[in-house]
Amino acid sequence: MNVNLNFIGFKVEKLTCSKGFIWDINCNYPSCFFSRRSNYWLSSENYVVLDSNSSIILPDTLEVIRLNNDAFNLRLVDPNKMIKIADSVLIISKKLQFIGGMAEAHRIKGVGFYYLNDNQNAVKNYTEALKYFRYLKDKKNEARVYANFGNLYRDVDYEKALNYFSKALSITKPLNIHELNAGIYMNISNIFINRGEYAKSLKFLEKSRKIFVRLKDSSSFVLISQNFGVIYYNLKDYNKAEKNLFDAISKAKKDNLYRVLAGSNLTLASIYLEQNHFSKTDSAIKEDIKYSKNLKDTKFVHFYLYTAYELELKRKNLAKALEYLKKVYSYDSLQLVKNLSDNITKTSSNFYQLQKLKENELIIAKQKIKETQYWWLITGIISIFLLLILIGITLTYFRKKKLMIKELIVRNTVATLEQKALQALMNPHFLFNIINTIQYFICSNELNSANQVLANLAKLIRKHLEICLKNSITLIEEIEYLELYLSVEKVRLGKKMNYSINADQEIDIEEILIPPMLLQPFVENAIWHGIMPIEGDGFIEIDFTIREDVLTIKITDNGIGIDNSSAKKTDNNHKSRGLNIIQERIQLHNRINTTSIQISQRQTGASGTEVFLHIPV
């Protein structure tokens, strides 16, 4: 068998294979015995190594491959150490001009940053890895990067995540890359968990488990067991959930997999809390705190604080529950400031990444033009014609790229505004007033009233956490959220405020989708600027109607009226930031979507205000 191989710096003209795998390489390398090891042919005398694409690899590159493998194996143990090793591999690979080592090191760095919740740097490194793998025409690792991108979007954009996973499977299935197929199936299962489609989730997780059993991949069984535990918890099958979670914890402790340990204990705490096993819940929370500190993962800190709050609330230890609630609020406020800053940085970073990609593509285009210059000398007229075509294509390409960058900036601005909208919904005025009300009830020994307010506030915060990361929510979810918000305000304001929410019978409130966090700022505005200044009893009415595929939402109050409120400006301290942000969100939504949301508001007479929202469905 004769094969032409590419060697670093020059071409090997001939490679022959005879019996016993004796390879004769006509490039001053002696004949030597080769044996198969994973994706590589290893030389018995350490002269050369051939990979599965028949490319020669020098012995030094074996160290790069080993270091990359060691780094990847740390992903569930120590992501920071994982990134440090990948950085050292990049330095070595650049000196060796080993593009494959550089590509995998960038991919591993991306995985490390993903586990540290640093999506900006994860995207940057995945993009670099994808560029190198495409240059090498390495389809297998190109599929791995697509799967990594899918993980990145898994919790925030289900459709985009599924699109990346499908793109990866379109490569791995024909190539029979079973271990990668299994990992993708497990991640698709996680998407269906987030969407509440547990039957589909079980189906994909079982497909993943069968492949890992066939491959005897014991390390992946830990994640499989943890995911089964989460699914059965959501299905209220607590016995199966507990069994799988204990199995995951037992295996994870052997390898110090802190992320699995923290996640599994958090789920166990939720199971015990729902069964009113308070001492077990307390133990699970303490275990979670221990592993979360090792991880230094901010998400786990938030969830164990909130679970501790729910535990003390169920124990009717209201003072302690209130302490945890304050910690949750303080923690969330700090995280929000960081997230807003990260969003701005991310927008700039994405713009920078696109610019770098354009520069790289332009360099490649120039290199191709250089290689074909001698044809231009022979066919001058044809060359000019082709050059004009190339200029036209290039201009069109850059025009499209410019539009893509603008759209990316708009979409990132939308994400930033949505994050600001979350803060506006849980503004300090609202939370501090509720906490003061709870403290008043506790000091007055009105424990039933305090318990009622705490329970309603807990439901409101839980509902807030459920919908805050979604791109759209059902109408019934929005109505439930408004009911909770108004019930909490009702307890605080008493007879000062009454309300009603009405929906036409022909509206399918479980199917219609609307943007999240859209109505609450208008309701809050009606309370603060409409009802609070009047002397009598206030009333807010919210009506949902549908005509010709347009959902109309009408918010009416009997307050002083929007024109009178603007003229008086009685509350200079409370600015309706949420209302301004909603207006900006809707403007951007209308720019990037084919359908438009319309808003109008007016004073109904001497007093009172009506707000109309028209949403195509």
Image (spheres, helix red, strand yellow):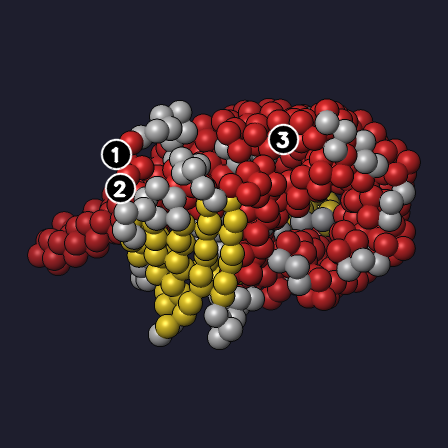
Residue at image point 19% right, 49% down: 395
| Residue 449 at x, y percent in the picture | 71, 38
Mark 3 or mark 1: whose residue is earlier in sequence: 3
| Residue 455 at x, y percent in the picture | 70, 42
Mark 3 or mark 2: whose residue is earlier in sequence: 3
Residue at image point 90% right, 51% down: 243
Q: Quadrant of the N terminus?
A: bottom right
Judging by the rendered image, the residue that carries numbered circle 1 is 567
Judging by the rendered image, the residue that carries numbered circle 2 is 563
Residue 286 numbered tag: none
Decide: marks 3, 1 in contact (CB < 8 A)?
Answer: no
Decide: marks 3, 2 in contact (CB < 8 A)?
Answer: no
Q: Quadrant of residue 360?
A: top left
Examine the rendered structure and indicate whether residue 577 appears above or below residue 2. Answer: above
Residue at image point 73% right, 47% down: 37
Examine the rendered structure and indicate whether residue 477 appears above or below residue 562. Answer: below
How many marks can you see?
3
> Looking at the picture, which amino acid does disc 3 mark?
Thr
Circle 1: element type = helix
Examine the rendered structure and indicate whether residue 378 appears above or below residue 413. Answer: below
Q: Is disc 1 surrounded by few (<14), some (14 to 19) or many (20+) residues within 10 Å?
A: few
The answer for how far apart the CA atoms under marks 3 and 2 are is 31 Å
Which is nearer the eye, 335 or 402? 335
Going by the image, does 340 lie left or right of 240?
A: left
Judging by the rendered image, the residue that carries numbered circle 3 is 437
| Residue 456 at x, y percent in the picture | 66, 44
The answer for how far apart the CA atoms under marks 1 and 2 are is 6 Å
Q: Quadrant of residue 44?
A: top right
Going by the image, does 345 lie left or right of 469?
A: left
| Residue 597 at x, y percent in the picture | 33, 57
Q: Is disc 3 surrounded by few (<14), some (14 to 19) or many (20+) residues within 10 Å?
A: some
Decide: marks 1, 2 in contact (CB < 8 A)?
Answer: yes
